[in-house]
Amino acid sequence: MQSLSSTPVLRHRPFLLFLVARMATSMAFQMLGVAVGWQIYALTASPMYLGFVGLAQFLPMFLLTLVVGHVADRYDRRAIARICQIIQGLSACGLAWASFSGWQTKESILVIIFIVGAARAFEGPALQALLPGLVPVEIFPRAAAWSTSALQTATIIGPAVGGFLYEAGATAVYSASGVLFLAASVCIGLVTVQRLATKHEPVSFRSVFAGISFIRSRKEILGAISLDLFAVLLGGATALLPVYARDILKTGPWGLGLLRSAPAAGALTMSVFLARWPLRHRVGRTMFRAVAVFGTATLVFAVSTSFPLSFAALAVLGASDVISVVIRHSLVQIRTPDAMRGRVSAVNAMFIGTSNQLGEFESGLTAALFGTVPAVMIGGVGTIAVVVLWMRLFPQLAQVDTLDQ
């Protein structure tokens, strides 16, 4: 008899629909990122405003962290995700109309991106907490790897398509993004999941902060989440890709799209490998090694003036990052009770948002102060320093051998 651990996860129809929805919403967001980045840099010629785009996405996620976790644990996670995807679709259509009408400004972009950030703050924990209920726990690591593969595929296709569509104008990119967000909402609406009957805690100060308390009590989870946070916060160079594409590598929007696709290309290759050959032993030490490679690849990208070398460095960066993503995601979801997954996922999403969106603001700020290349170099060195420090602060993470209990 075939064991569950060897059962193809794509045979689970709810998981397959979930996968398509995540691909669509991720591809839409990546296309949005290309258009917003190129358009706002064209309007302002300032890397600082590229940082403000990240800040506009981070603030609602940070402010709503405790609220969205409770919502994901108390209400239908599919409905939450659908509503958020519809809001993002309408926001993209708003950007399309503003560009078409000719009244697009840097302020209008930042306001609408803030709304998108608020919607994603609710969507992320709901989708993360939904996934474990779609497949048996025995094959969840494979499902997590497939989910990551789908996201990375979308992250490859999205920026490339967005970059080429931008040749026809920002309106085309925003319109296509809006359609994809709305298509994702339809797919999530078709997902069926057998939700376990759980007794909800009364809303209280203790229940609101339960996700934070749980993560603090599990040092290996806290170490994994915080390591990823500080590594990407310091080492993230994606916010400055419009500057590299336009001023250093001398390409157009198509070049920016390819550069944004490069980390996902490396990540997809690695995630397919992990789906076929999952991590089984010494996963904690593997995570530390992967983050160190991430920092090294950031340094190579910082000093490169060759498009092929820059693309390759970003691909290696993405491949190493996906290893830490799969380990962190599996640790959080497998070792968290279902009744708390929404709150724990919300805290996890806040950490991810801090590393990604606040990292973009940090990159824009340091680039404005020290220059683009020094800013990225500082980030790469800082990432490697964080790895060394975290190995001392969180020996529990280094000692994690397997992802399951």
Image (cartoon, helix red, strand yellow):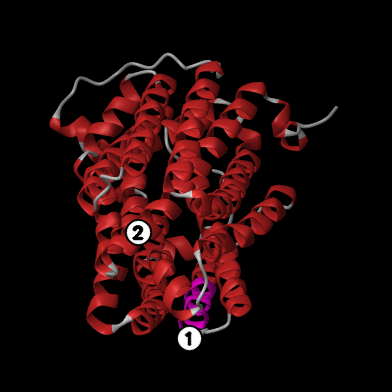
* Secondary structure at numbered mark 1: helix
Q: Amino acid at mark 1?
A: Val
User: How much space separates mark 2 and mark 1, taking CA atoms?
Assistant: 22 Å
Q: Residue at x 56, y 57 (%)?
A: 322
Q: Which residue is mark 2?
A: 355
Question: Does the segment drawn in magenta span residue 382?
Answer: no
Question: Does the segment drawn in magenta span residue 296?
Answer: yes
Assess disc 2: are there few (<14), some (14-19) or many (≥20) residues with their C-alpha within 10 Å of its C-alpha. many
Q: Residue at x 52, y 84 (%)?
A: 304
- Mark with earlier residue (2, 1): 1
Side of 163 relative to 348 (left or right): right
Residue 237 visible to the viewer: no
> Image quadrant of residue 360?
bottom left
- Taking 179 as reference, is 403 above or below it? below
Where does the image place residue 245, in percent across and percent down from the top left?
47, 71
Query: Which stretch did the figure color magenta?
Result: 292-303
From the viewer's side, name the closer residue of 162 and 86: 162
Q: Which residue is mark 1?
A: 303
* Secondary structure at numbered mark 2: helix
